[in-house]
Amino acid sequence: MARFSLLVLLIMLAVLSGCSKLTTENYEKIKMGMDYGEVAGILGKPDSCSEALFAKSCIWGNEQKNITVNFVGDKTILFTSKNIR
């Protein structure tokens, strides 16, 4: 029974790792002027955001692999990616 549980866990991890929204295709969907809701609709909930006055910077992913989008007045003004495929 323990082997079956381990096998199920490994299969679930493999499936989940293949579901990442950090892809080149999704990055290319992001456009200047998109609002936060549109970007979140493409990439899902960000892993972190910071805000100052009317500016907001959100990161999807981690230090090794990420998409960063900067918003001013809820509109995309700058976006970058690191190690996405």
Image (cartoon, helix red, strand yellow):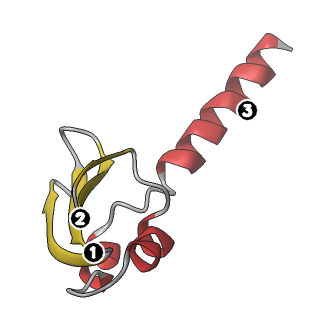
Q: Quadrant of the C terminus?
A: bottom left
Task: Give the secondary structure at mark 1.
Answer: loop
**Which corner quadrant of the image does residue 67 belong to?**
bottom left
Residue lying furthest top:
2
Residue at image coords 86%, 14% = 1
View extreme (front): residue: 53
Kind of residue indicated by mark 2: Phe
Identify the residue position indicated by label 3 in the image: 8
Of labels 2 and 3, earlier in sequence is 3
User: Circle 3 sits in a helix, a strand or a loop, which is it?
Assistant: helix
Estimate the x, y position of residue 22 in percent, counting from the top left: 34, 60
Q: Earlier in the sequence, mark 1 or mark 3?
A: 3
- Front-most of 64 and 2? 64
Q: CA distance from mark 2 to mark 3?
A: 46 Å
Judge whether 14 appears above or below 54 on screen: above
The residues tagged by marks 1 and 2 sit, at their Cα atoms, a distance apart of 5 Å
- Residue 20, image x, y percentages: 44, 56
Amino acid at the residue labelled 1: Gly
Res 26 → quadrant: bottom left
- Position of 60 with respect to 79 (left or right) is right
| In this view, 66 is above or below 34 | above
Judging depth in this view, the residue of 4 and 31 nearest the camera is: 31
Indicate which disc, 1 or 2, sits on the residue closer to the N terminus. 2
The residue carrying mark 1 is 73
Disc assigned to residue 54: 2
Confirm or deny contact between disc 1 and disc 2 (CB under 8 A). Answer: yes
Secondary element under disc 2, as helix, strand or loop, is loop
Camera-side residue: 25 or 62?
62
* Residue 30 placement: quadrant: bottom left
The amino acid type found where label 3 is placed reads: Val
Q: Position of residue 7 (x, y in %)?
A: 69, 28
Cα separation between marks 1 and 3: 45 Å
